[in-house]
Amino acid sequence: MAFRFIVDRVFPLAEGGVVVEGCVESGAVREGHPIAFLSPAGRPMQDCILTIERSSDRSFVARAIAGDHVRFLLPDASPSELAPGTLIEDIRD
């Protein structure tokens, strides 16, 4: 099943990149997984999940599955490229 994640919150980082918080709707994802999304302006974007943190206890995990509420660090994204409601998914071939 394809990976799908809906962004609830966006946290800009002073050193660059963003943290997005939300729920894994389907599939699974690991650290290092390449992802794609559309910016609020409709521009296709890509990044790679650097870290995964469980929202419930703030512990870092290597993998998240459907139903998990987590935070992802996206090192190359900017806060203007993501908003609540953004769908993050697998990169399509």
Image (cartoon, helix red, strand yellow):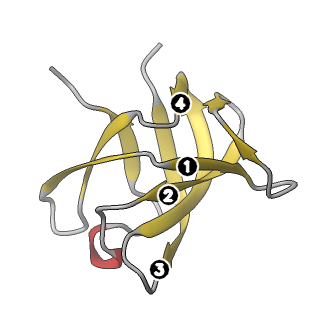
Q: Are marks 2 and 3 in contact (CB under 8 Å)?
A: yes
Q: CB atoms at circles 2 and 1 under 8 Å apart? A: yes
Identify the secondary structure beneath mark 1.
strand
Residue tagged 1: 51
- Name which of mark 2 and mark 4 comes first in the sequence: 4
Image coords of residue 39 (percent x, y)? 23, 62
For label 4, the SS is strand
**Residue ID at (44%, 69%):** 18
Give the vertical position of 7 relative to 36 (above or below): below
Q: Return the residue nearer the eye: 80 or 77.
A: 77
* Amino acid bearing label 1: Thr
Tell me, for residue 73, which label it has, or none. Answer: 2
Q: Amino acid at mark 4?
A: Arg
Find the distance from the CA under tag 2 to the CA under tag 4.
12 Å
**Nearer to the camera, 31 or 79:** 31
Q: Secondary structure at mark 3?
A: loop
Q: Which mark is residue 30?
A: 4
Q: Amino acid at mark 2?
A: Leu
Mark 3 to mark 1 CA distance (whole Å): 14 Å
Q: Residues within 10 Å of mark 2 (few under 14, many from 20)?
A: many
Which comes before the other along the chain, label 3 or label 4?
3
Left or right of 40, for residue 1: right
First reached walking from the N terminus: tag 3 or tag 1: 3
- Percent position of residue 51, x then y: 55, 49
Label located before the other in sequence (2 or 3): 3
First reached walking from the N terminus: tag 4 or tag 1: 4
Circle on res. 13 = 3
x and y, in percent, of residue 85 in the image = 45, 59
